């Protein structure tokens, strides 16, 4: 049995009632964006997820295409975005879900520098021998806020509780863990530095 299979076996042993309580529902991908947010003048980056409320004031603007890094202008920082935008900046607002299994307790979402790229990945918090899960990249470096391009099969979805949508966002992949791991190879991410708590933005 692979390490990934062992991890999922432990997750599956959680109470059945909990598995039945939490589900997911799709989100229009044009209304959400995953952003690498610079901390300490770009020395570190944290994940911020923005969601646009339809027919409301624009929450962000993107600059740059063509396969390179996309710079994001977070317009919502310049006005009271209540009722127009939703912002998630930590594990209270987002987590990882693979093949219908919540991994939030077992994996922590981080951003690490790898060569000339910023990589979004989930680091195992309990079984340190388990491999990290690569979720997406910025496709290069640039100054400021950068859009994270999710790897094929990865998407954002809204958590549901007993069938009702709640504010929590999943970074989710519907395939088994082995498939999700194969999407991105991240052998060096296990040594990536973790931003200290003081460097993480608050909601």
Image (spheres, rainbow, N blue to C red):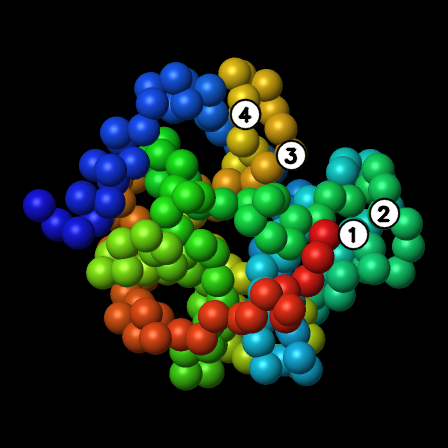
The answer to whether marks 2 and 3 mark residues whose Cβ atoms lie closer than 8 Å is: no
Residue placed furthest toward the right: 79
Sequence-wise, which precedes: disc 3 or disc 4?
Answer: 4
Residue displayed at 59% across by 19% down: 164
Q: Nearer the viewer, mark 2 or mark 3?
A: 3
Q: Nearer the viewer, mark 1 or mark 4?
A: 4
Sequence-wise, which precedes: disc 4 or disc 2?
Answer: 2
The answer to whether marks 2 and 1 mark residues whose Cβ atoms lie closer than 8 Å is: yes
Spatial CA span between label 2 and label 1? 8 Å
The image shows residue 21, relative to residue 82, as above or below, that is above
Residue displayed at 38% across by 59% down: 123
Which residue does the numbered mark 3 point to in the structure image?
167
Residue 115 in the image: x percent, y percent? 41, 83
Task: Please state if 93 lies on the left or on the right of 80 as rendered.
Answer: left
Task: Please state if 101 lies on the left or on the right of 70 as rendered.
Answer: left
Residue 25 visible in the shown view: no
Residue 27 in the image: x percent, y percent? 58, 35
Which residue does the numbered mark 1 point to in the structure image?
59
Sequence-wise, which precedes: disc 1 or disc 3?
Answer: 1
Which residue does the numbered mark 2 point to in the structure image?
81
Badge 3, how many Cα within 10 Å: few under 14, some, many 20+?
some
Sequence-wise, which precedes: disc 1 or disc 4?
Answer: 1
Residue displayed at 89% across by 60% down: 78
Spatial CA span between label 2 and label 3? 16 Å
Spatial CA span between label 1 and label 3? 17 Å
The answer to whether marks 4 and 2 mark residues whose Cβ atoms lie closer than 8 Å is: no
Which residue does the numbered mark 4 point to in the structure image?
160
């Amino acid at each position: 049995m692979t390490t990934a299979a062992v991890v999922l076996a432990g997750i599956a042993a959680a109470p059945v009632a909990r598995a039945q309580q939490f589900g997911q529902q799709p989100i229009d991908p044009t209304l959400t964006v995953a952003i690498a947010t610079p901390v300490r003048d770009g020395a570190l980056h944290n994940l911020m997820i923005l969601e646009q409320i339809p027919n409301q004031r624009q929450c962000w603007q993107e600059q740059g295409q063509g396969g390179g890094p996309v710079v994001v202008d977070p317009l919502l920082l310049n006005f009271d975005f209540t009722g127009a935008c939703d912002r998630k900046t930590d594990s209270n607002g987002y987590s990882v879900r693979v093949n219908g299994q919540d991994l939030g307790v077992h994996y922590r979402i981080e951003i690490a520098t790898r060569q000339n790229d910023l990589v979004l990945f989930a680091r195992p918090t309990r079984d340190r021998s388990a491999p990290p899960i690569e979720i997406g990249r910025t496709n290069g470096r640039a100054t400021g806020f950068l859009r994270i391009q999710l790897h094929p099969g990865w998407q954002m979805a809204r958590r549901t509780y007993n069938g009702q949508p709640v504010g929590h966002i999943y970074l989710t992949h519907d395939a088994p863990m082995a498939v999700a791991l194969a999407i991105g190879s991240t052998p060096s991410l296990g040594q990536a530095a973790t931003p200290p708590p003081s460097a993480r933005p608050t909601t």
